[in-house]
Amino acid sequence: MIITEPKWKSYVVETIGPIFTAKLCKEIIDLSSTLKKEQGKINRKEVRDYDKNRRHSTISWIAFNKMQPMYDDLIYLIQKINRNHFGFSNIQITEEAQVSEYSKGQFYHWHTDNPIDMDREPPVRKLSMTLLLNDPSEFEGGNLEIAGKKMSHMKQGHAAIFASFLQHRVTPVTKGVRKALVVWFSGEPFK
């Protein structure tokens, strides 16, 4: 007998329509402009520091108490998406959301969102979500690629949800600024 994954199971889901309105995207951008900015770090066991050869971006963190309704909407949405596409157990938000900004020349090289050595787990990051906050006409380049596939339908408010263990990257921005909301959904270790 050959056992395979169910046909319904996915490891990458790209939303067809927006999951956040343009108004909510603007609220998040406006809030992020008031938050402390820092350079994006690399979080590997051997390197937990700035490495502009692998990641060059500016980030800020949205505290749970700043946008609790957004977090509530996201957990409801991800529970539904997880049931329909991934089938992972015990998915929840355990980390603050990150606003990532990529200006001209900035990028994030191929990486995964969960450390393989699991030195800081559990909970284990199981799903990652990147939601485009600004209109794609405001920048060029900055493509999100997951497992070698370009997410080609990303518009303002649209998202890509994917298994956190998949390699992904953001290609260099060649013009303007790309702004995205990044959220991780975690749970018990994989069995």
Image (tube, rainbow, N blue to C red):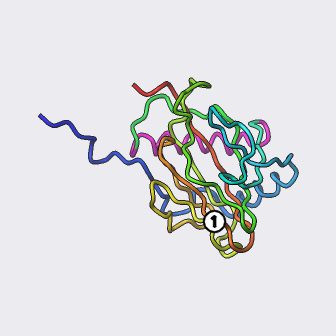
What's the amino acid at mark 1?
A: Gly
Front residue of 53 and 185:
53
SS assignment at label 1:
loop
Front residue of 114 and 44:
44
Quarter of the figure that contains the C terminus:
top left
Q: Around disc 1, counting alpha carbons within 10 Å, would you say few (fewer than 14), some (14 to 19), or many (20 or more)?
A: many
The residue depicted at 65 percent of the width and 52 percent of the height is 54
Using residue 44 as the reference point, say whether residue 104 is left or right of it.
right
Q: Report the span colored magenta.
A: 65-85
The residue depicted at 44 percent of the width and 30 percent of the height is 89
Relative to 41, residue 100 above or below = below
Please tell me in which quadrant of the rendered image residue 73 appears: top right
The residue depicted at 74 percent of the width and 68 percent of the height is 104
Residue indicated by mark 1 = 142
Q: Main secondary structure of the magenta part?
A: helix
Quarter of the figure that contains the N terminus:
top left
Front residue of 81 and 38:
38
Image location of residue 67, percent across then percent down? 75, 43
Using residue 16 as the reference point, say whether residue 50 is left or right of it.
right
The residue depicted at 70 percent of the width and 36 percent of the height is 48
Please tell me in which quadrant of the rendered image residue 96 appears: top right
Q: How many marks?
A: 1
Relative to 100, residue 126 above or below = above
Using residue 40 as the reference point, say whether residue 80 is left or right of it.
left
Image location of residue 183, percent across then percent down? 62, 44
Using residue 152 as the reference point, say whether residue 28 is left or right of it.
right
Image location of residue 155, percent across then percent down? 59, 67
Front residue of 169 and 128:
169
Image location of residue 106, percent across then percent down? 71, 62
Per the image, is 159 magenta? no
